Image: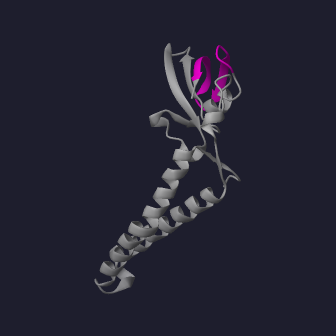
Amino acid sequence: MADEFILNAAGEEALRQELKELRTTGRADIAEKIKEAKSFGDLSENSEYDEAKSDQGKLEARIAEIEYMLAHVKIVDESSLTNDVVHVGSKVVVYDEEFDENLEYQIVGFAQADPLEGRISDDSPVGKALLGHKEGDVVEVEAPGGISSYKIVSISR
């Protein structure tokens, strides 16, 4: 895992809420599933029990992942960000020359990334290419699908 997880305050709070939910409701739900599956008898051929134990392992892994992330979080102070260059926390409108369209992204740490919502990681090919550039700059992004060019139309918070 990474040594540092970049989040804004809302992202950190969302992780803390998820952790709280998993530790309370999530664990209680899994315990109930295991209890119910045990009541079906022979555990050696009990697929419900196996599935419940697998779900428990996934839940505990997610709890450990969130705890690790929160222990290594770096909070971006969005109030101190400028719109001079693209950085983590910036909202960027870029013009995609190949498809003749404007795209809007917010650059976030990977823990907050959600490409379907327009939030891309600072470690993604597009996010990494945009960092440090100014409005009007044209950046080339090398991605698995080939090279794409984007012109930075605007930068905001």
Q: Quadrant of residue 56?
A: bottom left
Q: Is residue 33 magenta?
A: no
Depth check: give the residue in front, 138 or 43: 138
- The quarter of the rendered structure image containing the C terminus is top right
Q: Furthest-bottom residue in view? A: 42
- Give 27 or 40, whichever is nearer the viewer: 27
- Display colour scheme: one colour
Query: What quarter of the picture does the N terminus occupy?
Result: bottom right
Range drawn in magenta: 134-155
Residue 88 seen by the camera: no
Q: Residue at x 55, y 51 (%)?
A: 12
- Image location of residue 21, percent across then percent down: 43, 62
Residue 42 visible in image: yes
Image check: 55 left or right of 86?
A: left
Residue 55 picture quarter:
bottom left
Q: Dominant secondary structure of the magenta stretch?
A: strand
Q: Left or right? Give the position of 29 relative to 94.
A: left
Where is 6 relative to 143, above or below? below
Q: Residue furthest front?
A: 79
Residue 111 image position (x, y, % from top left): 57, 47
> Can you give x and y, in whole percent of width and height, for residue 72 in the image?
67, 56
Q: Nearer the viewer, residue 58 or 83?
A: 83
Q: Is residue 20 above or below residue 89?
A: below
